Amino acid sequence: MIALFTPFTVKKVTFRNRIVMPPMVNGSGDEEGRVTEAALRYYRERAAAGTAMIIVEATAVDEKGRCWRTGLGAYSDRHLPSLQRLSEAIRAEGCVAAVQLVHGGPQGAPELAGGETVGPSAVAPSPDAPLPRALTVEEIHAIEQRFADAASRAVQAGFQAVEIHGAHGFLLDSFLSSARNRRTDAYGGLVSNRARILAETCERVRERIGADALLICRISVFNKRAEGFSQADLQVVVQGLESAGVDILHISTDGAFKGCFGAGKSIGKWAREFTRLPIIVAGGLGDPRNAERAVADGHCDLAAVGTAMMSDAEWTKHAAEVLGV
């Protein structure tokens, strides 16, 4: 049996195999954040190849949290018609339609965000980046609500899952970073506090969408390795997300099989020790044999294939041929 091509069910949603296209921004929106015809073709082709789930690229929840001039948006009802066309195009091919929601935070584009960026603290994400303004607690709560509002629009538009972007240095991940988060209130200090905005955002989204869609949360550890982020920290974050109502944990890596926390155990296998949630892992799975190994050997339940699928719309079809399905 080929593990990569076995069905998998989470709650009421059945995936026809274990292959996921993760969110990858390709500038497929117009300047108002609406889906273009080119985006419809792009995602439809990858769904038609047999992919189990497509997570549409990072989609802004706040006009002041945008990162890309032609990035997608879900911060206004004006985005609903084109988002609905996109979800229908993906689902028509038998593929689960998901969308990732993001606030750029310190990695947002100032020219798109009202002239400033925001973050947990006034710490720039890189030497050449502008200094973000530290958010107030009231602003944190307002952003959490914008995630919930955007998730509600996504579900209304027909998406079967929404993913909260808590990785790669964007706003929610910046709070989790001890290097970027210098706060001394309830959102800073201990990892349980730094993870608070992520957990609260997931709780708000879960409450808003109820059982109408799956809730996924994406996290990354490799970008916090130099800060000393530990397996104990991972346990706190993962168990907090499970308690917040997350259905699937999505881990972005710099190598799905790479040893983590000074051991030979992959991040996916570490996470399995801390949670019963199904796990998606992304990182170096472009060779179908590696994607098969990741699932068969228990590193993940669903394998995310990013760059390879971006360049090859029929990656899933070709993977079946390689693996003899």
Image (cartoon, grey):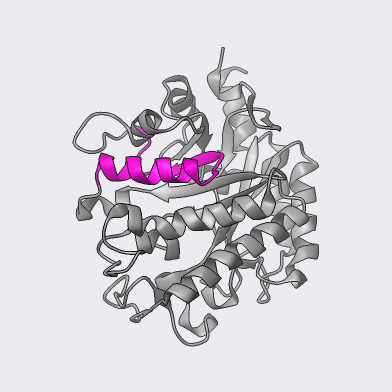
| Residue 254 makes an appearance in the image | no
Residue drawn at (24%, 44%) of the image = 230
Asked if residue 1 is positioned above or below residue 218 in the image, the reply reads above
- Quadrant the C terminus occupies: top right
Q: Where does residue 298 sit, x and y in percent of width and height?
A: 43, 23
Asked if residue 29 is positioned above or below residue 303 in the image, the reply reads below
Residue 11 image-quadrant placement: top right
- Disc tally is 0
Region in magenta: 230-257
Q: Where does residue 70 sit, x and y in percent of width and height?
A: 61, 71
Q: Where does residue 289 sit, x and y in percent of width and height?
A: 46, 25
| Residue 47 makes an appearance in the image | yes
- Of residues 26 and 120, the one nearer the viewer is 120
**Was residue 252 drawn as part of the magenta stretch in this picture?**
yes
- Quadrant the N terminus occupies: top right
Residue 232 image-quadrant placement: top left
Residue 208 image-quadrant placement: bottom right
**Was residue 18 drawn as part of the magenta stretch in this picture?**
no
Asked if residue 316 is positioned above or below residue 128 in the image, the reply reads above
Asked if residue 318 is positioned above or below residue 230 in the image, the reply reads above
Residue drawn at (55%, 17%) of the image = 2
Q: Where does residue 228 sit, x and y in percent of width and height?
A: 20, 50
Image check: 56 left or right of 278? right
Residue drawn at (55%, 52%) of the image = 203
